[in-house]
Image: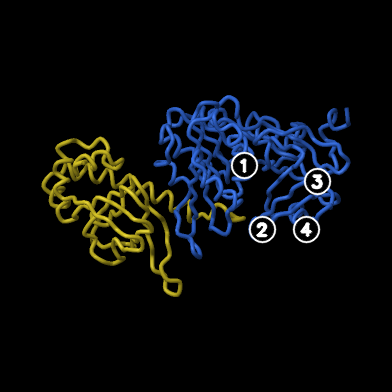
């Protein structure tokens, strides 16, 4: 059976992370499982965790009055969910709902922020990795926003 | 030898055998020779010039099975006067066809490699002949992954075939939509988001990409980030093609004519001017 540290270091998001940091952040982590349709978190709530998805598919949704929840993106295996935990005011910007049986490693946000405050090198490493995710998702969202398959796209 | 073989500007008469509506504005025409005389066999990725008499002529990629050249299949979208007239054609109506023209997907030279086919919107149509070829010669290739992005589930092409391909054990099919509508419970996001985690070996993969040019630009970036080199990425380019045979120069793209040197082009040969505003 794989230890949590092994799972973390094998996940693409943390690939290449120094061993001492893996040991540090593993103390903030735990395995979680979500059934289809179960919510990981809701828009507006305190962003108290982030997730490394190991298996499954999660829909990121925004509630639109008159339309209900609208899926803006899905996040699947080998991806990471949640960066609101590291950006004030630490509130979720969207809702996350499992579409399939989903297994993930969840990291406690307070624990992570404490460790990043105490060790700025770790904090910088986290910031670099999450900035990569934010930039990547922003680019994808821009492309999505362009509606490239429409006649005027 | 008929006139066509000596004159690429000479259209042969074909009849509509069947017209299939793919979605709101996209349809597939199945054509057969009217007078028994047919065009030479095409290769996956090539295109024909289809002529609606009295209206005009346009280039459309062949989207049928290259092993069945008697049945010419083209999928297109009703966006201009010619395609709108084409959408109104009925069984047994006639049109002129010239071709096949241009370069093709390099099916023979990629034997043994993993193949990653990335299609966006109607860009799945020029990839379909390659998929038929791969399935007929499956043992010649490594892992084969099809990544397809559409605007919504209603806009997807070849839905029944996509489901059939997805059910095969030797073809991995991943589909995503830009907007989740109705009962869609699959992936949401642009097609490029599937590239980082798609199951292929970037060091031994060849990618075939077809879709709107902006989608291809971001797809190339994602493939290169994953480790696929420029000389292993092929794009199906589109420009305003008129003659189809490199005579008129309408489709010039840098030092190339898309109708003659393309539409399928290797990325390392065009990367210096790909994405530039004016070439």
Is tag 2's residue or tag 1's residue first in the polypeptide sequence? 2
Is tag 1's residue or tag 4's residue first in the polypeptide sequence? 4
Q: Tag 3's secondary structure?
A: strand
Q: Which residue is mark 3?
A: B51
Is tag 4's residue or tag 3's residue first in the polypeptide sequence? 3
Give the spatial CA distance, label 2 vs label 1.
19 Å
Q: Which residue is mark 4?
A: B88
Give the spatial CA distance, label 1 vs label 3.
22 Å
Give the spatial CA distance, label 1 vs label 4.
24 Å
Disc 1 to disc 3: CB gap under 8 Å:
no
Q: Which residue is mark 1?
A: B128
Q: Tag 4's secondary structure?
A: loop
Give the spatial CA distance, label 4 vs label 3.
14 Å
Is tag 3's residue or tag 2's residue first in the polypeptide sequence? 2
Same chain letter for marks 4 and 3:
yes
Q: Nearer the viewer, mark 1 or mark 4?
A: 1
Give the spatial CA distance, label 3 vs label 2.
19 Å
Same chain letter for marks 3 and 2:
yes
Q: Nearer the viewer, mark 2 or mark 1?
A: 1
Same chain letter for marks 2 and 1:
yes
Give the camera-side residue of B270 and B225: B225
| Image quadrant containing the N terminus of chain B | top right
């Amino acid at each position: 059976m794989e230890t949590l540290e092994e799972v973390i270091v094998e996940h693409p998001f943390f690939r290449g992370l120094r061993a001492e940091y893996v040991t540090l952040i593993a103390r903030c982590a735990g395995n979680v499982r979500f059934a289809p349709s179960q919510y990981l978190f809701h828009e507006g709530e305190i962003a108290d965790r982030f997730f490394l998805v190991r298996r499954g598919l999660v829909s990121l949704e925004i509630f639109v009055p008159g339309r209900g929840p609208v899926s803006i993106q899905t996040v699947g295996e080998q991806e990471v969910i949640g960066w609101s935990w590291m950006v004030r005011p630490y509130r979720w910007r969207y809702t996350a709902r499992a579409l399939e049986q989903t297994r993930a490693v969840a990291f406690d946000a307070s624990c992570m922020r404490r460790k990043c405050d105490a060790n700025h090198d770790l904090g910088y490493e986290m910031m670099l990795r999450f900035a990569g995710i934010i930039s990547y998702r922003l680019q994808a969202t821009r492309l999505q926003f362009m509606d490239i398959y429409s006649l005027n796209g | 030898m008929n006139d066509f073989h000596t004159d690429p500007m000479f259209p042969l008469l074909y009849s509509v055998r069947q017209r299939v509506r793919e979605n709101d504005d996209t349809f597939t025409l199945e054509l057969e020779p009217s007078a028994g005389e047919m065009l030479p066999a095409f290769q996956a990725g090539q295109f024909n010039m289809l002529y609606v008499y009295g209206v005009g002529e346009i280039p459309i990629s062949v989207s049928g099975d290259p092993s069945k050249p008697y049945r010419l299949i083209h999928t297109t979208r009703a966006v201009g006067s010619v395609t709108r007239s084409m959408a109104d054609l009925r069984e047994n109506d006639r049109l002129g066809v010239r071709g096949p023209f241009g370069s093709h997907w390099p099916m023979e030279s990629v034997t043994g490699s993993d193949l990653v086919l990335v299609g966006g919107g109607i860009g799945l149509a020029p990839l379909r002949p390659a998929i038929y070829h791969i399935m007929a010669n499956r043992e010649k290739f490594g892992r084969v992954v099809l990544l397809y992005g559409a605007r919504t589930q209603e806009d997807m092409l070849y839905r029944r075939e996509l489901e059939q391909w997805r059910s095969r054990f030797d073809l991995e099919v991943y589909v995503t939509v830009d907007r989740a509508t109705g009962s869609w419970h699959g992936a949401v996001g642009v097609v490029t988001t599937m590239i980082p985690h798609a199951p292929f070996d970037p060091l031994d993969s060849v990618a075939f990409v077809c879709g709107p040019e902006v989608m291809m630009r971001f797809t190339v970036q994602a493939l290169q980030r994953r480790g696929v080199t420029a000389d292993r990425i092929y794009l199906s380019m589109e420009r305003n093609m008129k003659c189809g045979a490199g005579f008129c120069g309408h489709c010039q793209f840098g030092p190339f004519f898309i109708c003659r040197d393309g539409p399928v082009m290797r990325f390392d040969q065009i990367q210096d001017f790909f994405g530039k505003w004016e070439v």
